[in-house]
Image: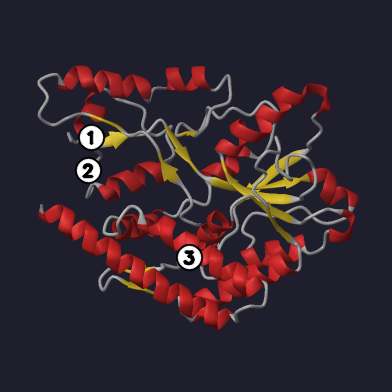
């Protein structure tokens, strides 16, 4: 890929209007060079139902809350009235977010050994188990139901990516019209105890670049420049999209919500570390590990296993699966 720095300078392209954490991440990933520009990115927020918080006189979630603080807040809602404090449709997705925000890695990439049977993982596992067993945490794939528990006003909080706005909230509002009464807002995603300032929960989608070997570098740059321009960002800001505009002045926000939080909580250093480690892991492994972990978590929740036994089982079964996939990858690359 072609380094875009000279083209950006020559054309006085407005890079300052783009989120500098994202640009910094790309520069560091490129060893100081900028090989591409993303018009959009993804990040996670803590969505909450203001009416439920008001009804039960519970303070709204704040930016910078830890997962422990969020679950303690969730426990204040009356489960006996059919209200859960926190909702997730996938336990594995929630667990991944919790682990990432606390800097936990399930694999030592140098030795290719699982590292889940540790005190740090045990603490997270116990926190999640406590929230689930207390019924403050509702785990439910809404399946045939049209709307999830947060959308229907039966759960006070959920952590979701920005696309949840387009795919769930705005869609439900359009679908139900005057019957849609969710009074929501959003806070920054929960963080880990050791890093309250940020969490590596952002992701990049399409990154537009110029092939270093093309004979049409200028034409290609014109396209990259246009896609990432203020003109296009302004046009796109008139309606909702699945992702966050990298240009910070052009967020779709007709209801005046706290959308600026999606530009916060971006940990470049943590994300760089995660990104470099993930390159070495077989693509299918994490899905297999999530399945193993979900099964062991549910066994612990039913009292069939202790937390220590569940973690040991995850460690052993996960390592067996990793070794298997690494061998398959090695054999495939050797052909």
In the rendered image, residue 320, in percent from the top left (x then y), is placed at 34, 71
Is any part of residue 195 visible from this angle?
A: no
> For this rendering, which residue is in front, 20 or 143?
143
Numbered disc 3: secondary structure: helix
- Residue at coordinates 76% horizontally, 68% vertically from top-left? 134
Q: Give the alpha-carbon distance from disc 1 to disc 3, as whole Å.
A: 45 Å
Residue 82 vs residue 75, the one in the foreground: 82
The one nearer the camera, 323 or 212, is: 323
Q: Position of residue 272 (x, y in %)?
A: 34, 55
Q: Which mark is residue 33?
A: 2
In this rendering, position of residue 126 left or right of residue 235: right
Q: Which mark is residue 292?
A: 3
Mark sitting on residue 5: 1
Question: Are the two marked residues, 1 and 3, in contact with CB atoms closer than 8 angstroms?
Answer: no
Q: How many marks?
A: 3
Q: Do the CB atoms of the residues marked 2 and 3 lie less than 8 Å apart? A: no
Q: Is residue 226 above or below residue 16?
A: above
Q: Is residue 65 above or below residue 305?
A: above
**In terms of sequence position, does the residue under pointer 1 or pointer 3 come before the other?**
1
Q: Write the residue at 72% across / 47% down.
A: 48
């Amino acid at each position: 890929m072609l380094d875009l720095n000279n083209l950006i300078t020559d054309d006085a392209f407005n890079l300052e209007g783009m989120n500098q954490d994202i640009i910094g991440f790309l520069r560091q990933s490129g060893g100081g060079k900028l090989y591409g520009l993303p018009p959009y990115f993804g990040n996670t927020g803590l969505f909450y139902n203001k009416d439920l918080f008001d009804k039960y006189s519970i303070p709204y979630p704040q930016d910078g809350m830890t997962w422990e603080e969020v679950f303690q807040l969730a426990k204040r809602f009356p489960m006996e009235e059919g209200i859960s404090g926190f909702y997730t449709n996938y336990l594995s997705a929630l667990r991944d977010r919790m682990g990432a925000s606390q800097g936990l890695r399930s694999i030592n990439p140098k030795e290719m050994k699982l590292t889940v049977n540790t005190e740090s993982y045990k603490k997270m596992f116990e926190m999640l188990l406590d929230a689930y067993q207390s019924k403050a945490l509702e785990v439910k794939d809404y399946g045939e139901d049209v709307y999830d528990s947060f959308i229907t006003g039966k759960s006070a909080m959920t952590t979701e990516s920005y696309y949840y706005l387009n795919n769930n909230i705005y869609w439900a509002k359009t679908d139900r019209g005057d019957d849609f009464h969710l009074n929501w807002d959003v806070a920054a995603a929960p963080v880990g105890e050791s890093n309250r300032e940020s969490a590596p929960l952002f992701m990049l989608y399409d990154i537009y670049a110029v092939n270093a070997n093309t004979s049409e570098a200028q034409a290609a740059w014109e396209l990259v420049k246009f896609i990432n321009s203020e003109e296009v960002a302004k046009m796109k800001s008139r309606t909702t999209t699945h992702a966050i505009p990298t240009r910070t002045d052009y967020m779709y926000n007709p209801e005046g919500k706290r959308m600026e939080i999606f530009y916060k909580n971006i940990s470049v250093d943590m994300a760089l570390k995660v990104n470099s480690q993930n390159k070495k892991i077989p693509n299918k492994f994490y899905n297999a590990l999530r399945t193993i972990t979900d099964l062991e978590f549910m066994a612990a929740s039913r009292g069939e296993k202790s937390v220590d036994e569940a973690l040991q089982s995850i460690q052993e079964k996960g390592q067996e699966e990793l070794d298997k996939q690494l061998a398959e990858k090695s054999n495939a690359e050797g052909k």
